[in-house]
Image: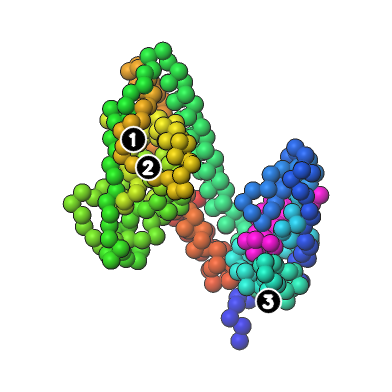
Amino acid sequence: MNSFPDGWHIKPLSEVVSIQRGFDLPHHARRPGPFPVLTSGETGGFHDEGPIKGPGVTIGRATNLGQPKWSEGDFWPHNTTMFVKDFRGNHPRWVYHYFENTDLAGYDSGSVQPMLNRNYIAHIPVLVPSTQEQRAIADVLGALDDKIAVNSKLAETSDELVSLHFRRAIESEGTASRPLFEAIDIDFGEPFGGSDFSAPGIGRPLIRIRDLKTFTSQVWTTEIRSREILVQPGDVVVGMDAEFRPTSWLGEPGLLNQRVCRARGKSTGPAFVRETLREPLRRIEGYKAATTVIHLNKKDLQEAEVLVPDTESLELFEASVEGLYSRRVAVAIENRALEAVRDALLPQLMSGKLRVRDAEKVLENAGV
């Protein structure tokens, strides 16, 4: 007895899509243009030619095996990828979601360098709904993707505006150089013991250096310390090893671990703190770059100087940006919630275990 919904069918991948290897395009051969070069890595740049008509999908072939990328318009599929040459009547966005939901990493060629070969995956069974159902699934997931994209653009624009206002503020005639500790309070994380580390959900989340890029605590702790620092969303934190970057914490509240510090303004909000720390931290990192592993310490911060605008310019900056900054933090937190909803819906929709009408109710409850 079939365990999938009526109207859904199992087909080999070769009957769902036609896949072809991408084309070589060395960096020296790329010419400025509007067409994205889709590689298996993070970025591929742009070119003045897009030989494949969009919308389209590429799949990582040389690295990030099987991981798809979507292009709304024409694009250049790099030879580190494969691309969908023919969707065979299937909805392109649904095909993208299929690859997004399918782990192809185990189908590499077995050579020294992992490589995905289209012949190895041609016979993979695919559960295929009707084209109408495919479109409905793509619409549901697309609504989430669109909302996440709008929020991301809003956050990017907010950051740019904050930086612009800061540059204007420090260009005022009354700007003066002051010791960093006169303008900013620095709190250092505590050395929580590894014996008290626990799985997520047990105890309280711990913020370590590795979490500053993902804003997700991988380790929690059951330990209680007398001088512990609780970081809130929007607080400015700085990793004290390797790279010194003032980072707006965008995760849930968590305890500050050793080798991470929190910065707060004595009379200013977090936007000013983040912007004013960029240059002194860059300088400190620069003069330590010759060492094998660089560390930020309290003495470095005690000796650092920061630019502080005159009172009027600083008040104008605060009035102009703190609302922007708060909104930027809010949309980042909203995006994390939307991404969690999307990650939960994707496998359920693609397997038919959750039907579109029920997923639409989830979106409605999420405010999408």
Q: Secondary structure at mark 1?
A: helix
Q: Nearer the viewer, residue 367 or 276?
A: 276
**Percent coordinates x, y for residue 368 in the rendering:** 50, 50
Q: Residue at (33%, 56%) from the top-left corner?
A: 206
**Disc 1/disc 2 C-alpha distance (Å):** 8 Å
Q: Which residue is mark 1?
A: 301
Which SS type dominates the magenta stretch? Answer: loop
Residue plotted at (32% across, 57% down): 205
Mark in front: 3 vs 2: 2
**Mark 1 near mark 2, Cβ–Cβ under 8 Å?**
yes
Identify the mark nearer the N-term, 1 or 2.
2
Q: Are marks 3 and 2 in contact (CB under 8 Å)?
A: no
Looking at the image, tell me whether mark 1 or mark 3 is earlier in sequence order. 3
Q: Amino acid at mark 2?
A: Leu
Q: Does residue 70 show up magenta in the picture? A: yes
Residue 202 visible: no
Disc 1 to disc 3, how far (Cα)?
A: 59 Å
Instruction: Give the extent of the magenta segment.
Output: 51-73
Q: Secondary structure at mark 3?
A: strand
Residue that carries the numbered disc 2 in the rendered image: 296
Q: Identify the amino acid type marked 1.
A: Leu
Nearer the N terminus, badge 3 or badge 2? 3
Q: Quadrant of the N terminus?
A: bottom right
**Residue shown at the point (38%, 17%) measured from the top left:** 175
What is the spatial separation of the Cα atoms under label 3 and label 2, in whole angstroms? 53 Å
Residue indicated by mark 3: 125
The extreme front residue here reads: 291
Does any portion of residue 185 appear in the rendered image? yes
